Amino acid sequence: MRNGRAVGPDSLAASIRQRIGVELKDEQLLRKALCHRSAVPLDAGLSYERLEFLGDAVLSLILCEWLYVTLPSLSEGDMAKRRAYLASKPVLAEAGRMAGLDEVIVLGPTAEVNGERHRASIRADVVEALIGAVYLDRGLRSARSLVRRLLKSAFQRVSEDGCATDSKTRLQELTQARWGMLPTYDVPAPEGEAHQPTFTAVVRLGGRVLGVGRGPSKKAAQQEAARCALDSLDEAGGLPNGQTD
């Protein structure tokens, strides 16, 4: 389906092959991977939810394998942090956006009108569902190739700079990639006693407030503000006040 209009089998298969570089033999499985629950309210089994569940597990295996083989000096804790970053909603959503998956997600009429097509969390779910579908249809090798292709930029960041998995870095990467803008932080004078201050940070993008955070230091407050901003962008799928990508 594209913008509420059905897409023929050949057209859909070709479109997905162009976007993710893999052709699925099972057309029904492919359609299920793209179908949001709002499009099949009477039968959740026809939506992508079960494939998303499977894809999440397949993705975790592939990421753990890649981290173990590619970065042999990492400790278990460091691998866990980097796996969490690579499997995070913002990273998956951005991969889905770059692949153009927004155009092929199948939504119900109400969800379509409400702008759910461009919701980052749905885009991330579809990425996981497609990974699950490719695993079932083509096997682990094809699923591994798909993950490495979709997350190529994120893999490169993990390899080159340790991934700086903090929220400030992730927010900066997201806003730079999506809107070509960098967030700014405002941290006024702290409150409380001198020996136990509380800092408040406000992060903005283009004059819009994305998040507010508090902490015992400027750095901690900024990290919390960035984390709140990432959560907000993930839920809204775009900038506040209706501006989207």
Image (cartoon, grey):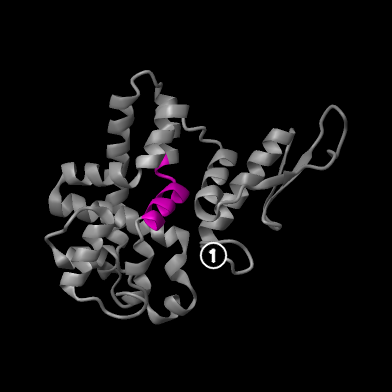
Seen at 45% across and 58% down, the residue is: 121
Question: Quick check: 166 left or right of 36?
Answer: right
173 sits to left or right of 76: right
**Residue 191, picture quadrant:** top right
User: Looking at the image, which residue sits at the far top?
Assistant: 73
Q: Please indicate, yes or no, whether residue 96 appears anywhere in the rendered image.
A: yes
- Residue drawn at point x = 16 percent, y = 53 percent: 136
Inspect the magenta stretch and tell me whether residue 90 lies in it.
Answer: yes
Residue 73 in the magenta stretch? The answer is no
The quarter of the picture where residue 31 lies is bottom left
Q: Is residue 56 above or below residue 243?
A: above
- The residue sitting at the left extreme is 25
Identify the image quadrant of residue 11: bottom left
Vertically, is 26 above or below 141? Answer: below
The residue located at (26%, 68%) in the rendering is 45
Label the magenta part by its dominant secondary structure.
helix
Name the image quarter holding the N terminus: bottom left
Q: Position of residue 15 (x, y in %)?
A: 24, 65
x and y, in percent, of residue 160 in the image: 43, 28
x%, y% of residue 79?
A: 40, 29
Local crowd at mark 1 within 10 Å, few (<14), some, or many (≥20)? some
Which residue was labeled with disc 1?
A: 244
User: Which span of residues is magenta-colored?
Assistant: 86-98
Q: Is residue 112 above or below residue 48?
A: below
Q: Where is residue 135 in the image (x, y as percent from the top left)?
A: 19, 49
User: What amino acid is at disc 1?
Assistant: Thr
The reply to whether residue 124 is visible in this rendering is no
How many numbered discs, if any? 1
Task: Identify the residue at image location x=79%, y=38%.
Answer: 198
156 is higher (above) or lower (below) than 108: above
Q: Is mark 1 on a helix, strand or loop?
A: loop
